[in-house]
Amino acid sequence: MGVKQDLSQPPMIRLDKLVKIYQEGTRSHTVLEEVSAEFAPGEFVVLLGKSGSGKSTLLNLVSGIDAPTRGDIWVNGAPITRMSERERTLFRRQYIGFVFQFFNLIPTLTVAENVLLPVELAGLGQAGRERGLHLLERVGLGDRLQTFPDRLSGGEQQRVAIARALAHNPLLILADEPTGNLDEDTGRQVLALLDELTREVGKSLLMATHSSEVVGLADRVYRVRHGKLIQEAAEFHGELGD
Ligand SMILES: Nc1ncnc2c1ncn2[C@@H]1O[C@H](COP(=O)(O)OP(=O)(O)OP(=O)(O)O)[C@@H](O)[C@H]1O
Ligand SMILES: [Mg+2]
């Protein structure tokens, strides 16, 4: 808790009557049905919900990787749903960091090159590169810069992915089940690191997860269910059932 709403600042994320319908042949599947919500800057928001409920769909819409059927999304006041694809890509490169369940490191690039790629794509110079390398120190991999991802454990790969997601100093970090492929202890360490590094710099974190560990760290917990986004009351935080 302790996130103060600054009225002079726009919400970090604003969802307005967001609809996502997947069309499969003649059948249509409504995954999100008029979802509206606002998340403040600096907040750590968790998305729960059973498999297939629409958590990844929502994260992909907020990141601009995918477009909604209807409705609008603003990120830090910018209407990403009204941008061209090119504008959205540039916006994402500058302002958003993404941590995936399967790490998604580029196998032909070293640890350092993986982390420095978003820095280069965002057009950041030496200061950006130093920031990326510093983050690798912070995640405990400063001595593995020239290593390739296939030589790292799952937990180590995810720590590289966290450094990569933060390297270009994004405003918003999206994480889709970042501990889904890690054992419990490693998962806990990765979560603590993600929480610490994002809070330290006052960034916003939106995370989809099945892990009950996260709930205690989050400022707010939502559940995706039957196409709606429902905020969980504090007393239900410990219950992960659907
Ligand atoms: N490209 C697509 N085309 C058709 N249907 C899709 C597509 N992507 C997702 N879906 C469907 O949308 C629903 C929501 O999927 P989504 O991946 O968002 O769920 P999720 O909550 O992330 O699940 P999990 O916890 O298993 O990751 C599912 O029923 C899925 O089959
Ligand atoms: Mg998912």
Image (cartoon, rainbow, N blue to C red):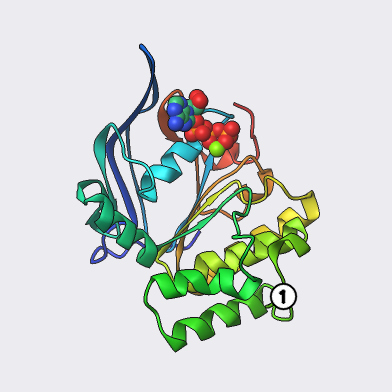
Residue that extends furthest to the front in the rendered view of this protein: 108
Give residue 161's position: percent from left, percent from top.
60, 62
Give residue 7's position: percent from left, percent from top.
25, 63
Q: Which residue does the image show at 63% across and 76% down from the upper left?
A: 136
Callout 1 amino acid: Gly
Q: Which residue does the image show at 68% across and 49% down from the upper left?
A: 213
Q: Is residue 115 left or right of residue 146?
A: left
SS class, disc 1: loop
Q: Is residue 189 left or right of residue 34?
A: right
Q: Which residue does the image show at 45% across and 87% down from the upper left?
A: 127
User: Alpha-carbon neighbours of circle 1 within 10 Å: few (<14), some, or many (≥20)?
Assistant: few
Quarter of the figure that contains the C terminus: top right
In the figure, 164 relative to 99: above or below? Answer: below
Q: Is mark 1 within 8 Å of ligand 2?
A: no
Does any portion of residue 224 appear in the rendered image? no
Where on the picture, by quarter, is residue 90? bottom left
Does any portion of residue 217 appear in the rendered image? yes
In the figure, 123 relative to 160: above or below? Answer: below
Give residue 67's position: percent from left, percent from top.
32, 40
Classify the position of ligand 2 by quadrant: top left, top right, bottom left or bottom right.
top right
Q: Is residue 172 left or right of residue 106?
A: left
Residue that extends furthest to the bottom in the rendered view of this protein: 126
Q: Which residue does the image show at 78% across and 60% down from the upper left?
A: 153
Give residue 52's position: percent from left, percent from top.
54, 28
The residue tagged 1 is 140
Q: Nearer the viewer, residue 224 or 55?
A: 55
